[in-house]
Amino acid sequence: MKVLITGGAGHIGKATTERFIKHGWEVRVIGLEDGIEVSGAEFVRCDILDYDDLRQQVSGCQAIVHLAAIRGPQLAPGHEVFEVNVAGTFNVFEAAAAEGIRRVVQASSINAFGCAYSLIDIAPKYLPIDEDHPVFTTDPYSYSKEIIEDIGRYYWRRGGISSVALRFPGVYNRDHLQTEKYRQYRERSRVLLDEIMVLPEAERQARLDSARQHTVEWRRQRPLEFKDRPPEPLNRHSGDDPLWLVYGFDRFNFWASLDVRDAAQSIEKGVMASYEGAHALFVNDSHNSLGYDSKCLVRLVSIAKARELIGFEPEYSVGDWQ
């Protein structure tokens, strides 16, 4: 079996390529880089916006894993984010249809829900959040992910291509999350939440209301989007109110995360599992990223559909790393 992996030399792509090779697949990787060597795989320079070249690279493959994209609104102006992510995805599915390929797995994002880069506060209608929950995207990256999921549904209706759009949260490797800097931030967050939970109700609510107001005012300025240059990275060790950092950032990701090895697992299962139709799937760790009492944080993102449809089950718990 032969699979084409767009963006297969990237963060998730590398782990995915290695997993497919390990399990005996013939792998062709495409990307924009020059001189890339991917051990055990063929690498071809190809721009997903060049349809004719893309179709040539798709030829002879039995499945496509589509990971190539601009990975956030901070990395390029909104029109470029939308063009690459949406037009590129359309080209991938169109090439698949032209070459008779009936299985595509694509990287969507938890942001298809409209969370991490949102300009407004998030107010889920119910918990835990699942794939049936209405979306409320307000930034170009998240909107592009909302649209690419619909592209998958279009090609199921049009040509019978089955696909999954995996709504990845932050995807990490073990080395990153075992750094002292991250460990300290995680521990401070847990201590802060302990302190907040024991406050009298009125005082606790006042602290949360203040953090919410700060968050909404800050996000309305679109600080996480590319303007004339990428935004400055958030300094989680600055003098900002630590509760605001937890409320205004970690909460907007629902404390969801994923080990890169489990990202690769979900992609392989998305290719191999028996299903029909086009499906969006939340794929994340079964534990929250703080390793905190879930009764306090609430289990916000459900992976039940991914378990049922493709048999995904997290094997590496980010929240348990010490």
Image (cartoon, helix red, strand yellow):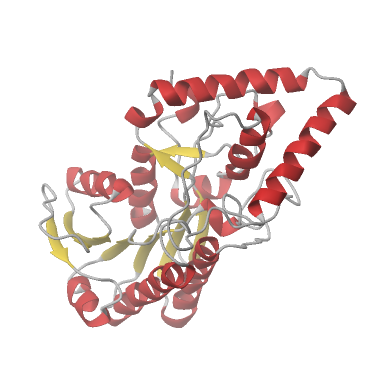
Image quadrant holding the C terminus, namely top left
- The answer to whether residue 99 is left or right of residue 215 is left
Image coordinates of residue 25 in percent, x first then y, are 18, 53
Q: Is residue 122 visible?
A: no
Viewer-proximal residue, 157 or 6? 6
Kindly identify the residue that appears in the image at 48 percent across and 68 percent down: 78
Is residue 115 depicted above or below 186 in this figure? below
Quarter occupied by residue 313: top left
Image coordinates of residue 176 in percent, x first then y, are 36, 31
Quarter occupied by residue 264: top left
- The answer to whether residue 36 is left or right of residue 181 is left
Image coordinates of residue 165 in percent, x first then y, are 46, 60
- The answer to whether residue 311 is left or right of residue 11 is right
How many numbered callouts? 0
Quarter occupied by residue 295: top right
Is residue 126 depicted above or below 314 in this figure? below
Image quadrant holding the N terminus, namely bottom left
- Which residue is situated farthest in the right direction here? 202
Is residue 320 depicted above or below 37 in this figure? above
Kindly identify the residue that appears in the image at 21 percent across and 44 percent down: 18
Q: Is residue 24 visible?
A: yes
Image coordinates of residue 114 in percent, x first then y, are 61, 57
Viewer-proximal residue, 135 or 196? 196
